[in-house]
């Protein structure tokens, strides 16, 4: 049974209304006609509430979750993830070299300083195929170093390492990497550095990984049982049926959807945002394919290197056997001469 979201959000327009506005503008109709039929349908479904809105589109997420304008929303999300009350003190600039130099499949990143001095980096990975622990460790170390430098510059001689707060690396995966898929019964992973002797030291770096595709598979037709599941439903589920279920159980999400559908009233702005998402997705897909091909090349290079090693060892054995044969031949010749 299809759910009509218009009964909850009256501002939602019909397909005819959206297409009418597009056709009245040369710029909008040209842009619309550049898209494939599949992408045109996706855009119309988004604007008319037929399929719900993908919250994890970078532009949409930042519009409704921007901690500079709506801090209570990100406060609430971080509170349920970190299991403690969170208040954002400041949004930090993305001035680290990794944000500018590294080409990676991040579609959203927000770095915030919390009231207790800790830092949280919230990111979404569209394609999590190659997001190894090494990369997460580098991201975490990057934030830790930024915090250290900033505090040292501010406090100068009064600086102490105890001034440094925790660093949280929080990553939402729309499509999980293989390592997370192999643990199909868990949709949230929390980790930190520990000692095997139960020694307790504050090592500062903590990680929270949320594979939303696994959450979606686990929940399927189940109920939304708590606030954490409500947030993951908001982020990971875009069907009208799930939206209806969410706003019935947790009406505090209604204003967020209202903001999204208010945005959809500005067809030109939403089309520009949608085009940006498509372009980013295409670029990421190309990067993904290049990286996949590079992985295949690297793997084949390893196989060739191993084969070369084996061939080298066999050639070495053959050479030694040849030497041994020559040695035996000489002995035979010497024996024959002696007998003569």
Image (cartoon, grey):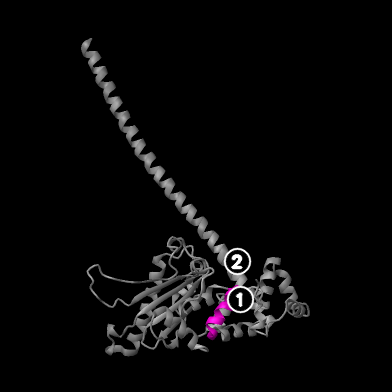
Which sits in the foreground, 89 or 10? 10
Q: Position of residue 12 (x, y in %)?
A: 68, 82
The magenta-colored residue range is: 238-252
Q: On the picture, is 166 further left or further right than 126?
A: left
Element assignment for label 1: loop
Q: Is residue 179 above or below residue 240?
A: above
The answer to if 240 sits in the magenta stretch is yes
Q: Quadrant of residue 158?
A: bottom left
- Residue ID at (53%, 81%): 249
The number of numbered badges drawn on the structure is 2
Give the alpha-carbon distance from disc 2 to disc 1, as whole Å. Answer: 19 Å
Which of the numbered marks, if any, corresponds to residue 278?
none
Q: Quadrant of residue 276?
A: bottom right
Q: On the picture, is 116 further left or further right than 64?
A: left
Q: Earlier in the sequence, mark 2 or mark 1?
A: 1
Pick the quarter of the image with the N terminus. Answer: bottom right
Closer to the eye: label 2 or 1: 1
Element assignment for label 2: helix
> What residue does disc 1 label?
53
Residue 21 visible? The answer is: yes
Q: Position of residue 334 (x, y in %)?
A: 23, 17
- Residue ID at (68%, 85%): 11
Q: Position of residue 330 (x, y in %)?
A: 27, 21
Pick the quarter of the image with the C terminus. Answer: top left
Q: Is residue 83 above or below residue 132?
A: below
Which sits in the foreground, 237 or 288? 237
Report the predominant secondary structure element of the magenta stretch: helix
Q: On the picture, is 13 further left or further right than 298?
A: right
The answer to if 250 sits in the magenta stretch is yes
> What residue does disc 2 label?
282
Q: How many neighbours does mark 1 have within 10 angstroms: few (below 14), some (14-19), or many (20 or more)?
A: many
Q: Are marks 2 and 1 in contact (CB under 8 Å)?
A: no
């Amino acid at each position: 049974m299809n759910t009509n979201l218009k009964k909850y959000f009256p501002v939602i327009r019909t397909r005819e209304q959206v297409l009418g506005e597009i056709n009245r503008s040369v710029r909008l109709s040209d842009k619309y006609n550049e898209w494939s039929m599949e992408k045109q349908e996706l855009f119309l479904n988004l604007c008319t509430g037929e399929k719900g809105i993908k919250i994890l589109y970078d532009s949409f997420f930042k519009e409704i979750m921007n901690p500079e304008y709506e801090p209570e929303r990100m406060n609430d999300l971080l509170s349920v993830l970190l299991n403690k009350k969170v208040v954002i003190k400041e949004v930090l600039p993305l001035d680290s070299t990794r944000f500018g130099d590294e080409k990676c499949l991040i579609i959203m990143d927000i770095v915030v300083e919390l009231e207790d001095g800790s830092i949280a980096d919230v990111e979404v990975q569209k394609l999590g195929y190659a997001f190894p622990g090494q990369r997460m460790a580098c991201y975490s170390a990057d934030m830790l170093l930024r915090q250290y430098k900033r505090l040292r510059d501010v406090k100068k001689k009064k600086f102490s390492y105890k001034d440094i707060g925790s660093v949280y690396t929080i990553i939402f995966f729309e499509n999980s990497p293989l390592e997370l898929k192999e643990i199909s019964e868990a949709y949230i992973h929390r980790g930190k550095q520990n000692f095997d002797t139960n020694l307790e030291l504050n090592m500062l770096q903590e990680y929270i990984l949320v594979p939303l595709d696994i959450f979606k598979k686990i929940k399927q037709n189940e109920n939304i049982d708590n606030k954490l599941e409500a947030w993951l439903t908001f982020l990971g589920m875009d069907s009208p049926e799930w939206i209806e279920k969410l706003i019935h159980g947790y009406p505090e999400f209604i204003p967020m959807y209202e903001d999204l559908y208010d945005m959809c009233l500005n067809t030109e702005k939403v089309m520009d945002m949608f085009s940006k998402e498509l372009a980013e997705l295409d670029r990421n897909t190309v990067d993904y394919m290049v990286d996949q091909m590079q992985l295949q090349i690297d793997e084949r290079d390893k196989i060739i290197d191993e084969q070369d090693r084996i061939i080298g060892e066999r050639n070495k054995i053959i050479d030694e056997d040849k030497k041994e044969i020559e040695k035996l031949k000489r002995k035979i010749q010497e024996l024959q001469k002696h007998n003569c």
